[in-house]
Amino acid sequence: MCVRALFVPICLAFTLTLFPLALFGAEKTDRFPAVDRERVQAMLQIAASDVQKYYFDAKLRGVDWNAKVAQAREKIAQAPSYDSALLEIAAVFETLNDSHTSFDPPRDPLPQDYGWQFQMIGSHCYVTQVRPKSDADAKGLKPGDEILSLDGFTPARDSLNKMEYVLNVLLPQSRLRVEFRDRSGKIHKVDIVAKVRQTRALTDLTDGSSRDAWELRLEIEDERRLGRPQIKELNPTLMIVKLPVFNLSEIAEDEIIGKARKHSTLILDLRGNPGGRENCLQDLLSGVFDRDVKIADRVMRDSRKAMAVKRKRQDPFTGKVIVLLDSRSASAAELFARVVQLEKRGTVLGDRSSGSVMEAKFYPHRVGASPYFYHYAVSVSEADLIMTDGQSLEHVGVTPDETVVPVAADLASGRDPVLARAAEIAGAILSPEQAAKLFPYQWPRQ
């Protein structure tokens, strides 16, 4: 089974050269049973085979894939722990330097909530959110603080995604050593303890009323809550849509375009949007164009095909379009914004986007014997996407027509100068304070 998507997988590239094993506690002295070592070797073999069979470039970007896999097999045979063995698989995938080709290891049954959020804004890494009553809150971390290092590693635009992969997917940590500079200029070093939510390694969904079934329902509902679009119709002039992910139903798409037609300007806020379904991207683009539009060429292993939007609506939105991006806007979000730019359909504001634009398929697997299966997955890029200007957005991103980013004081005071500027272009009056209150941050459930 595989799923095609235009999105940034949860697991991004990882490099052992940037993150030594000891940095995140991978060099543990825990017992590493032979059966677990064999499972890791099996995962390596299947994951590597997926890449060889399905990767869009048959030459694998010039990487001697078989040699890399053989080296990893030898290192896994000598690895001191399960965690360090998984790192060797991740390191093989890093050699491709591909945002959508990645290894998703078996999930930790004890998920961590670090209690704070951070991201690159311009060339600096800032704290953007702190969960109330978390350890991060107790240790004095505040929005607007600049992160200087995490466990000794300095965050940067070209490596922050890799760090987050380590922290959130590959090697979740019980605590993080954080060095940050507060707004007064004082530098602090603190250990922030993550909150661990106890879950069960095995789940029983045979009975719909079981605790496991209810937990699953709550998780699905939480994902829907965090992913649903939010619409603000401020006046006859302006409508703002906050779209967290490209995963809308046709009913929701029609609702957005139908409401937008009542206004002269549509602001589509794609900040933090990691991408999503290709057909959702096409449907939303068709809602703001009154003609056929080419998105990009899919460059695949043995063919090249156009990805296009056919005019499907008799009454698309024809007013002004403004798209907002930040460093976390990725994949389908970047494609939408770049098409709007190239076709001169609107204006893009904000920060340079992620530069994570490929088309991938998701291959889930499992290893082990019933009932103790270890579930893992592989995401493989099946196509590079070349825009109509002949360029790929991978590792490049979308440069806004006008760069507008919050400064530390904005983050600390709860102001949104980006949305306020977009409203100004639309001819509306919206202060940065008012803009920030339109779409307050929503924490996932603990």
Image (cartoon, helix red, strand yellow):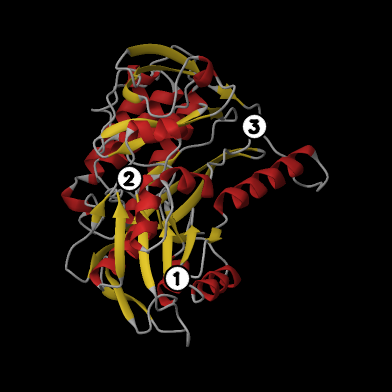
The residue pinned by badge 3 equals 201
Badge 3 crowding class, 10 Å Cα cut-off, few under 14, some 14 to 19, many 20 or more, is: few
Q: Which of 97 and 329 is in front in this view?
A: 329
Regarding residue 329, the answer to whether it shows in the image is no
Question: Tag 2, which secondary structure?
Answer: loop
- Horizontal side of 392 relative to 289 (left or right) equals left
Lower sequence index among marks 1 and 3: 3
Left/right placement of residue 213 relative to residue 128 reads: right
**Residue occupying image coordinates x 25% and y 28%:** 18
Q: Viewer-proximal residue, 357 or 115?
A: 115
How far from the left and from the top, in percent, is residue 430? 44, 52
Q: For the residue carrying disc 1, how many other residues have a C-alpha within 10 Å: few (<14), some (14-19), or many (20+)?
A: many
Residue at image mark 2: 327
Secondary structure under the numbered disc 3 in the rendered image: loop
Quarter holding the C terminus?
top right
Structural distance between the alpha carbons of marks 1 and 2: 22 Å
> How many numbered marks does the figure carry?
3
Pick the front one: 360 or 445: 445
In the rendered image, which quarter is residue 346 located in? bottom left
Instruction: Give the residue at x 36% y 12%.
Output: 188
Give the side of residue 389 with respect to residue 52, left or right. left
Which label belongs to residue 284? 1
Q: In which quarter of the image is residue 203?
A: top right
Residue type at mark 3: give it: Ala
Residue under the image location 36 percent in, 60 percent down: 323
Question: Residue 251's spot in the image, x, y percent?
Answer: 60, 72
> Can you see residue 95?
yes
From this viewpoint, which residue is outermost toward the front? 429
Q: Are marks 2 and 3 in contact (CB under 8 Å)?
A: no
